[in-house]
Image: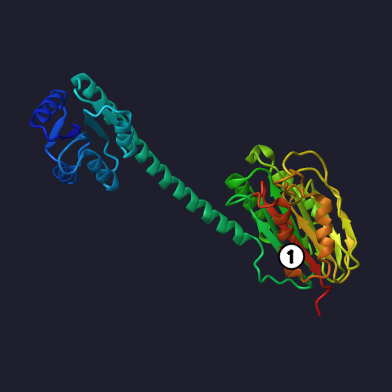
Amino acid sequence: MTSRILIVDDAAFNQKILASIVRKAGFECLVAGDGAEALRCAREARPDLVLLDVVMPGMDGYRVCAELKADSALADIPVIFLSSLDEAADKIKGLTLGAADYITKPFDGGEVLARVRAQLHLRELTQALQSLNHDLVAKQQSLDDDLSAAADIQRALIPRADLTLPGLALSWLFVPSLAVGGDIFNAQQLDAEHVAIYILDVNGHGVPAAMVAVLAWQSLSPAMGLVVRPGAGGWSVTPPAEVILGLEQEYPYARFERYFTISYLVLHLPSGRLTYCTAAHPYPILGRRDGTLQMLEEGGSIVGLGLGQYDEGEVLLQRGDRIFLFTDGIVELHSATTGECFGDERLHDVLRSVRDQPLPDVGQHLRSALASFGEGAPAEDDISFLVCEYHGPSD
């Protein structure tokens, strides 16, 4: 496509010389004899470049340039000033107004063409970059929309705010470091007497980790036959260590190039007996009514690496006892000032301090403590926290 050059000069001789130069070079040529005509022509014809005389009667070249740059439809058209004014201040004024270049009269035809071609090439590159940026923005928006939809799906998998289970009250905090993350947790009724509680953390961040987390959530659904299974006498609840061993077999690292940690607990509601197994995850914490904290440490290695067997632990809950489950994004949160980690000790202090607070306030109290410690620094890892309070067997 032939580039269109607008020549603006009140001297007919200069118009002819410049028009001859640009036409011989293969450019289309438009001519204006004053500032008002130049602006009218620019708005109608949309030239690719303007060669603009500075000294003209009425509206001078500086004012024409300012008018062009103030018009959003014309602002990207490069302007090259042509003037006999050779003072540095005159050149600086022109460039400050948005001119791309400045040629001093008397001009050389070769210099004019060289500068015209350079500015046209820069404009082509700029337009190409703008087009590419527009495409990238559109693709990023599409990706953001997809991530937002994925985040909505992931949030739909964590317990509902109004979830109630017999003999058990729940509260939680979930703050993914990205739109989606690798943390997921749940509490679900297995049969009339048993509730399963778990939290897991897939290594990495973003969509790949979230996809594995969702798959693991699906595997831990009672309908999938892992956490409850048929037997001769009907359905039976799978012990926690066997559940994690089943996950180990279903999610080898070679399958997804991801591994995960998990704490899986089964609560027998009538008796308060809690059996559990933790696979390299931060240990669940049992908070007694008297404020003492007990780490539930039985378990084994990371799920996916095939490193060994899984041991099972058991404790007896009393009415009012609380179980705290969390991911390492909490204890590994860094202070923006000192670089220090939040750590287990601070977490334990928070849990002791909320012993007598209503369950729904526990997660918000922890959120405030983390925000204060982090001093506004964004979390580097997903933050998940689940607290369950045992109320004893239902009537």
Badge 1: few (under 14), some or many (20 or more) residues near its Cα, within 10 Å? many
Residue 255 in picture, x, y percent from top left: 64, 40
Above or below: residue 375 compared with residue 122: below
Q: Quadrant of residue 86?
A: top left
Left/right of residue 6 with respect to residue 170 in the rendered view = left
Residue identifier under label 1: 190
Depth order, front residue of 249/100: 100
Residue 346 visible (yes or no) = yes
Q: Amino acid at mark 1?
A: Leu
Residue 228 visible (yes or no) = no
Depth order, front residue of 129/228: 129
Left/right of residue 186 with respect to residue 147 in the rendered view = right
Depth order, front residue of 145/110: 110
State the SS at label 1.
Answer: loop
Residue 36 in picture, x, y percent from top left: 15, 45
Q: Quadrant of the C terminus?
A: bottom right
Depth order, front residue of 219/207: 207
By what rule are the colours in the image chosen?
rainbow
Above or below: residue 344 compared with residue 352: above
Residue 331 in picture, x, y percent from top left: 77, 50
Q: Quadrant of the N terminus?
A: top left
Left/right of residue 66 with respect to residue 259 in the rendered view = left
Residue 142 in picture, x, y percent from top left: 45, 50
